[in-house]
Amino acid sequence: MVERPQGDMVPPVPSSCVIGVDLGGTKLLAGLVDADAEVRRRTYRVAPVTDDPEAVLEFVAGSIERLVAAARTDGRAVAAVGLGIPSLIDQARGIAVSTVHQPLDGVPVRAILQERLQLPVTLDNDANCAMLAEWRTGGAVGCDDAVLLTIGTGIGSGVVAGGQLLRGATGAATELGHTVIDFDGPPCQGNCHSRGCLEALASGSALGREGARMAALHPGSELARRVAAGEPIWGEHVVDAAAREDPAATVALDRVGRLLGVGISNAMNIFNPEVVLIGGGVSAAGELLLASARDEAQARARPPACEARVEVARLGADAGMIGAGLLAWERR
């Protein structure tokens, strides 16, 4: 009989974790995520401004390798990596098909990173990752049907229907930001060739444009003073000014909220969700945005779909990272 080593002679058994990565146009947020969706370590890095896909993937891989090293220091073994990016994804081949703010169109991201890292890599749209996190641990826990809209520079979205995260035939489903709410509306942003999309009218970028328009009609407002000083107006400026009851900002936020409500009513009618969650930077406006969005959505959607709750998402900026980690756990 072989005796088992005692005390310090027993080699430690590493506890498993995964790495969840949320890559945006200007930043990367990544963390060690355990099986309970707890983030044990995290890193935030400014993304490089480049047109070179290799430079972007080198940046991502380097960020992941730093966390792998940190995991080893903690006595943990990394089992897999999940990566969320602002792109339509070909799930079968792991290719970024159409990407916003990063030069990754047509790049086989999954295969390249798996070869570099020697770890299983899961790739998905960043809003799908955020929806998964909110469904499992956030504002949509216990719901079989839910919608998430992430409102920042653009509008991302994810949908859970019948207890399944919807991806569609090729992984390009639930692009609610590119549903048209105004046939003759303004051109959409980025690589979208349409007009009058929800993103063109109710995103953070749209809120900045509406704030500038309202500043011209309210010359004594805080936003008007920004314009007079030659300063730009972004969505965050409108949100901050509205919190101080600036008249131009209040009117701008109310209008964008109502346009958002039109888009939400479409989601209510199509998916009949229990809850519609609003995430992204513009969600910091809270009820200053959601009150008008909720009123418009409930007035337009058909009953009983109109009874869905409209709330701020709970996980904030961590949602995409946590969701990417959860995907890695599922597919490792």
Image: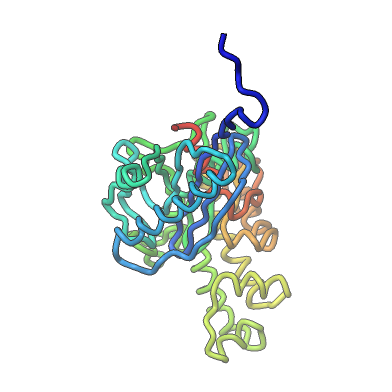
Residue 293 appears in view: yes
Residue 302 appears in view: no
Q: Quadrant of the C terminus?
A: top left
Q: Residue furthest right?
A: 244
55 relative position to 127: left or right: left
Which residue is pictured at 57% across the width and 45% down the height?
301
Which residue is pictured at 48% across the width and 49% down the height?
21
Residue 233, given in percent of the width and then of the height, sits at 54, 78
Residue 12, given in percent of the width and then of the height, sits at 59, 32
User: Which of 35/142 is in front?
Assistant: 35
Q: Residue furthest left?
A: 106
Q: Quadrant of the N terminus?
A: top right
Residue 282, given in percent of the width and then of the height, sits at 59, 62
Q: How many marks?
A: 0
Task: Find residue 11 and report its image quarter.
Answer: top right
User: Which of 304/264 is in front?
Assistant: 264
Which residue is pictured at 52% across the width and 55% down the height?
29
Residue 87, given in percent of the width and then of the height, sits at 38, 52
Up-down relation of residue 222 to residue 1 (above or below): below
